[in-house]
Amino acid sequence: MPLTRRALLARSLAGLGAPLWRALPGTGRTQPATAPPLHERFSDLRRHFVFEYYPWYGRDPWVHWNQWGRHPPADIASNYVPRLGAYDSRELRVLEQHARWIAESGAGAVNLSWWGRDSYEERALSLFLDVLRDHDLKVAFHLEPYRNDRGRRFADDVLYLLREHGERRGYDVLLLLRDADGRAGPVFKGFRTILPETETDCLGRVWPVPDYTPDDEWLRQLESLRRALRPEFERVVFLADTVNVVRAAWAGFDGIAIYDPFVPPEDYAGWALAATTMGLVSCFNANPGFDAVAPRHGNDPCARPRVLPDDSVDFSRPQERERAASLAARRLEESLDASLRAQTEPALRNAAMGFLLVYLNSFNEWHEGTAIEPMQDAALLSPAERALGYHNPESGERRLGTLSRRLQMLLHPPGHGIA
């Protein structure tokens, strides 16, 4: 039977001395002397805050907005109406507005959801990279499971991305992240990398996992990439979106990058310690929670809709929508703080390697309700939109405003105040 996340954590911690565990943030023990502020340790600090970004929306024809029985433009596959409405990811005015919001927030890069060569997302990429360059923003890539044999193509895909969107552009926009010692190199994250061969649903039915890739295949892919890239880059970091630190290490990844909002901020320190025991760095996202739109058709007996941070919210009531907005803003702050504490603890792997990376989840994953991109103010929704029961709060910029204030304090601390 597969180990639960907490069982994996317990196993990873089992051989580690208790004094280090008790010294972690939030455990009541005195911390070591304060390290220099982040802006003094990292000359490119804003590049270490990276928005997860989805270039998959379209209007003619409709793409993504029309999922799960929706009928845009008023009726979209989201619980929230964006400030820009149901937009097209290929439209210049949209991309420029996104780039302005991202740059003004203090973040310095986006992590682009990539679905293979010649995909819809890839075809929109050249224009977007030009816009990012013009706003002094960089791009990294989140390699999605665009086909079941994606694992066997991973090395070729990474080399393609480096060639097409790095070398051929003179590396004008590719994120080359610097560590505390100034060494620079690209970062790649894989989604659905460390998977079981089979999974069991809530009814006890066992299904094969179609995109399962054996750990030794990942190891071959990553070792070949390191050999190929060693002459060109001082460092290259490959991250797996998993809490299974044992298998991530066996598979040859450099670290873990947790995307899942259901991993709570209070667990970040423990997972950072578990990663350290396996020689891995760890990245944890800042997120406002989760509020996914439900499909209108189909009857999945295992579907369990949830809302984070509090699934008791009654979104039909204005005061409850405001409470949800406050909870989302608080969750953003708490997860950002927890991520920074876990990554700067002197006894752990990130600090030893001078590695810092906070993914901001997300700029525009509207389906899952994680979007930090401004949404429409509730008062400005059309009558048709109000009738559909969207969850928009009074201020649609609250999430981005909350994050921006915190990032600006980190980038420009008054009197070197925040580390």
Image: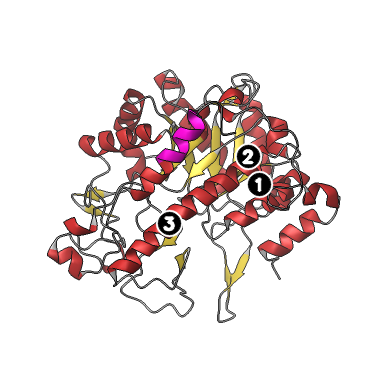
Q: Tell me the quarter of the image containing the C terminus.
A: top right
Amino acid type, callout 2:
Gln
Q: Amino acid at mark 3?
A: Ala
Residue 380: x and y, percent?
17, 56
Residue wearing tag 2: 221
**What residue range appears in magenta?**
404-412
Local secondary structure at mark 2: helix
Farthest-out residue, front = 415
Q: Residue at x 40, y 28 (%)?
A: 137
Residue 152 pos. (x, y %): 57, 45
Q: Which mark is residue 328?
A: 3
Q: Are marks 1 and 2 in contact (CB under 8 Å)?
A: yes
Q: Is residue 33 visible?
A: yes
Q: Nearer the viewer, mark 3 or mark 2?
A: 3
Which image quarter: residue 3?
bottom right
* Callout 3 secondary element: helix
User: Between residues 45 and 110, which one lies in front from this camera angle?
Assistant: 45
Query: Which percent across, then down, holds residue 272?
Result: 68, 47
Residue placed at 56% from the left, 37% from the top?
Answer: 357
User: Which is more foreground, mark 1 or mark 3?
Assistant: 3
Disc on the earlier residue, 3 or 2? 2
Q: Is residue 175 left or right of residue 195?
A: left
Determine the secondary structure under disc 1.
Answer: helix
Q: Which residue is mark 1?
A: 217
Residue drawn at 69 percent across, 34 percent down: 351
The tag earlier along the polypeptide, 1 or 3, is 1
Q: Is residue 172 above or below residue 4?
A: above
